[in-house]
Image (tube, rainbow, N blue to C red):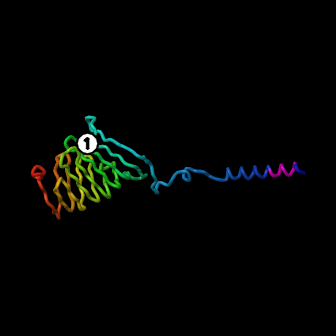
């Protein structure tokens, strides 16, 4: 009787196990996220990416705390981005809280606490704003939002600006106010 009960329990467990395995239909649809719902396709923590020109020289270096690229999107989200433009005589360091990098358009949109700091120059220029768009192909930075500009003792504000790094030309759009002191004469 004990043996018969043990065999019955064993057969019952075997049937339950077999049904639980064969009853579920695992298809590709249940294992893969739906194409309509975005999901993280790529992520990198504490990264540094260099863009190299045709001569083998670095155009810029983008680093940050985290980069996330979602499915069905040309955009990658970057937290705490640092963008380093490395051109001779026009070296700029640009930081922000967040950025969106669009690989199709080569536009980097920096958001929240954007600071552009000119490097390797005495009396360097510092530009701050809430939003800044950087076209990495043409090296043009632009925004329609309020910007604050500092250079030594000079201070200016504008609503919107366009800065062409390759030509070293800064255009202030409108509502411009402030004062400019020539850095060569400011110390006299």
Depth order, front residue of 137/46: 46
x and y percentages locating residue 150 in the rendered image: 20, 55
Q: Tell which residue pokes out farthest to the front in this image.
A: 188
Residue wearing tag 1: 86
Secondary element under disc 1, as helix, strand or loop, is strand
- Prevailing secondary structure class for the magenta stretch in the rendered image: helix
Q: Tell which residue pokes out farthest to the top in this image.
A: 55
Q: Tell which residue pokes out farthest to the right in this image.
A: 1
Q: Residue at x 84, y 50 (%)?
A: 6
170 over 159 or under it: above or below: above
Is residue 70 on the magenta stretch? no
Q: Tell which residue pokes out farthest to the bottom in this image.
A: 175
Q: Residue at x 14, y 60 (%)?
A: 179
Q: Which residues are magenta?
A: 3-9
x and y percentages locating residue 163 in the rendered image: 20, 52
Q: Is residue 31 left or right of residue 126?
A: right
x and y percentages locating residue 78 in the rendered image: 37, 51
Depth order, front residue of 3/78: 78
Q: Residue at x 72, y 50 (%)?
A: 17
Q: Quadrant of residue 97?
A: bottom left
């Amino acid at each position: 009787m004990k043996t018969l009960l043990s065999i019955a329990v064993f057969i019952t467990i075997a049937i339950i196990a077999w049904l639980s395995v064969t009853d579920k239909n695992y298809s590709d649809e249940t294992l893969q996220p739906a194409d309509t719902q975005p999901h993280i396709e790529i992520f990198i923590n504490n990264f540094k990416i260099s863009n190299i020109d045709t001569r083998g020289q670095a155009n810029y270096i983008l680093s940050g705390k985290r980069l996330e690229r979602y499915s069905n999107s040309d955009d990658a989200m970057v937290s705490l981005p640092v963008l380093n433009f490395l051109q001779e005589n026009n070296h700029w360091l640009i930081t922000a809280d967040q950025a969106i990098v669009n690989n199709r358009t080569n536009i980097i949109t920096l958001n929240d606490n954007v600071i552009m700091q000119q490097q390797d120059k005495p009396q360097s220029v510092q530009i701050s704003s809430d939003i800044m768009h950087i076209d990495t192909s043409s090296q043009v930075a632009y925004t329609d939002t309020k910007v604050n500009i500092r250079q030594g003792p000079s201070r200016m504000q504008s609503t919107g600006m366009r800065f062409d790094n390759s030509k070293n030309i800064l255009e202030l759009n409108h509502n411009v106010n402030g004062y400019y002191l020539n850095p060569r004469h400011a110390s006299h």
